Image: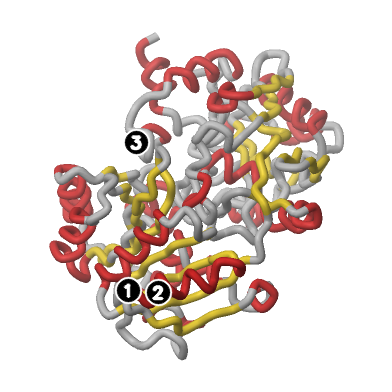
Amino acid sequence: MTVAATQSINWDNFVAALNGIEVIRDPGQVAKLSKDYYSYSPILQSLLADKVGDLVVRPASEAEVLQVAEVCVRYKVPLTVRGAGTGNYGQCIPLQGGVILDMGKMQAVKWIKPGTACVEPGAKLAAIDKQTRETGWEIRMAPSTYRTATIGGFIGGGSGGMGSITYGQLRDRGNLHAVRVVTMEDQPRVIELRGDDVQKVNHAYGTNGIITELEIPLGPAYPWAELIVTFPDFMTAARFGQVLGDSDGLIKKLICICAAPIPNYFAAFRTVIPSDSHCALLMIAESCLELFQELVKEFNGTVVYQKTAQEASKGTAIYEYTWNHTTLHARSVDPTLTYLQTLFPPDKELKLVEHMYHHFGDEVMMHLEYLRVNGTAIPAALQIVRYTTLERLQEIIKYHEDNGAFIANPHTYILEDGGRKTIDPVQLEFKQMVDPHGLLNPGKMKAWDQRQSTN
């Protein structure tokens, strides 16, 4: 590893070499911009609490990114790219100090065409949608941090969210069209990746290139009604979610199923959702509401909350109580809670979901998010866990895996140990080419560190 010990760097000379690019050196601001929401995990809290960068650099253009890359390579300074810091796994935490590259100033929407947009990485998802919706299109999928998350951060560290019930996950072919990437070679350059080549940097935590521009696909923009439906028991709610996910004629953006007592944590809906209810939080195209109501009747559901798209554009946003915002609201009441990320196998009867629900009870509170995988609607879970010890958490994970559920472990910052579970040779090969000194977000890609230790 050729990363320099950052305490030996003359930072005044380093900043001077940046020739006027904005730099933040205030320790409080640097510490703040070195963090994300890894505190959801009690394991990551202890591992990452003391990790901070040495300074923050805020480029305003691709040319400035190239200049920052050249200076970092010259000084052998590690560089960690940051979006809005809304991730949960320590993706943007600088393990070895150095430069935090805050991409927030690069937020232009360069062009919009039917079905496609070209954007800079610091553009916020909501801001992109505001412009694309004027042309009848919208972002295909977005996390629950939609209002604050950047597109570069979402591509670098995310996997799916609202819209995944229709379009699948970010890694699926067609969900990212092209990227421009700045390298960290001795003479940094810009590379354009198109088609399947985008997978070289998709969900790579910024370990193998600095994204400076993206071409993203768009979907038709519908007026989305927001609804909450309660059910007499959890499995009825879960099966309703499965059937809704399988109902191709009903246009939907969000199917979130929460078992009691999770809705009790939703302060904004306490007067709406009866205590200890099992419920579905949903976004349905307004044109489909009449037939959607027929499905609700089939499952003896009760609509307790409904807003038109126009009403939903103001005030409380239902998606901010789904995906990992569900965990956020639960932890705001009880900070000892943590969570898991689980992908259940395709099964219309939801037998494994039902088994886990009864086996763990309130220790692992069931929270499902339906998404499309290989053309099939399946439940992913972001269960809320009553944390006691690391050993017990590992037992819970092992029990799920032994019974056929896939765990994307949210308690590790290592790229391959989270959702991938395997080394990605394509991403490793690309890193060897574009980051030969290992300066980009060091310590996050296990394959690179193993390669270095054997050389």
Dot 2 corresponds to which residue? Answer: 296
- Do the residues under discs 1 and 2 have CB atoms within 8 angstroms? yes
Residue at x 37%, y 34% (from the top left corner): 420
Q: Residues within 10 Å of mark 2 (few under 14, many from 20)?
A: some
* Secondary structure found at label 2: helix
| Marked residue nearer the N-terminal end (3 or 2) | 2
Residue at x 81%, y 36% (from the top left corner): 61
Q: Nearer the viewer, residue 179 or 87?
A: 179
- Do the residues under discs 3 and 2 have CB atoms within 8 angstroms? no
**Structural distance between the alpha carbons of marks 3 and 2:** 39 Å
Dot 3 corresponds to which residue? Answer: 417
Q: Quadrant of the C terminus?
A: top left
Residue 379: image quadrant is bottom left
Residue at x 79%, y 54% (from the top left corner): 131
Residue at x 71%, y 18% (from the top left corner): 188
Residue 307: where, in percent of width, then height? 59, 78
Residue 68: where, in percent of width, then height? 74, 30
Query: Is 362 left, or right, of 207 in this rendering?
Result: left
Q: Nearer the viewer, mark 1 or mark 3?
A: 1
Q: Nearer the viewer, residue 156 or 38?
A: 156
Query: Is 184 left, or right, of 164 in this rendering?
Result: right
Residue 244: image quadrant is bottom left
Dot 1 corresponds to which residue? Answer: 299
Q: What is the number of the mark on residue 225?
A: none
Residue type beneath disc 1:
Phe
Number of numbered labels in the structure image: 3
- Do the residues under discs 1 and 3 have CB atoms within 8 angstroms? no
Q: Nearer the viewer, residue 178 or 99?
A: 178
Q: Residues within 10 Å of mark 3 (few under 14, many from 20)?
A: some
**Structural distance between the alpha carbons of marks 1 and 3:** 39 Å
- Is residue 75 visible in the rendered image? The answer is no
